[in-house]
Image: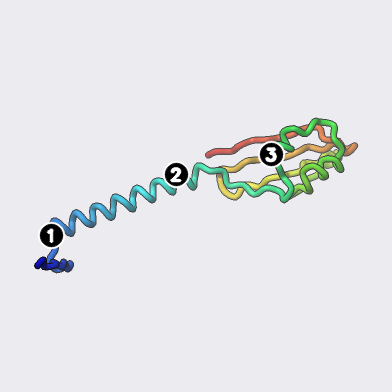
Amino acid sequence: MRLKREYSTEQWSRADKWILMLLISLVLATAGTFFSVVWTKRPQTRYAAGFDERTFVSMPLGLTADEVVRRLGPPLQKKEDPDGTAVWYYSEGLSKNFAHRALVIDQSGRLIHKTAWDIWD
């Protein structure tokens, strides 16, 4: 007949408790380091609803504003300069690491410049 031995925390020696606390601390520190690196290194970006990176990259300069909207959808934000040139923002940073995507439309309504930056701090 075998007797089952049960342990309670009162029976643990001081060394056992110290080792347990050390192991728990090590697991928590490792998990915290891993998740903080993963969280801070990934771009945190909000894109416009119809935005697609391949479409953005493949768009030729000279497209009309209507053609741009047909391909990528409306931008998140538009800013117009006094000279009539407009910058259309297709991304917005949600943290210090993000992807910046914008298009410049001239006074005649044609795409004249594409901007794509990945910003890492």
Q: Earlier in the sequence, mark 1 or mark 2?
A: 1
Alpha carbons under labels 1 and 2: distance apart: 35 Å
Alpha carbons under labels 1 and 3: distance apart: 58 Å
Q: Residue furthest left?
A: 1
| Residue with the mark numbered 2 | 37
Q: Earlier in the sequence, mark 2 or mark 3?
A: 2
The residue lying at 12 percent from left, 66 percent from top is 11
Expressed as whole percent of the image width and height from the top left, the position of residue 19 reads 19, 54
Expressed as whole percent of the image width and height from the top left, the position of residue 78 reads 78, 47
Quarter of the rendering containing residue 101: top right
The residue lying at 28 percent from left, 55 percent from top is 24
Q: Which mark is residue 96?
A: none
In the image, taking residue 33 as reference, residue 94 lies left or right, namely: right
Amino acid marked by disc 2: Val
- Mark closer to the observer (1, 3): 3
Amino acid marked by disc 1: Arg
Q: Residues within 10 Å of mark 3 (few under 14, many from 20)?
A: few
Q: Which mark is residue 53?
A: 3
Mark 2: which secondary structure? Answer: helix
The residue lying at 23 percent from left, 53 percent from top is 22
Quarter of the rendering containing residue 16: bottom left
Mark 1: which secondary structure? Answer: helix
In the image, taking residue 15 as reference, residue 88 lies left or right, namely: right
Q: Which mark is residue 14?
A: 1
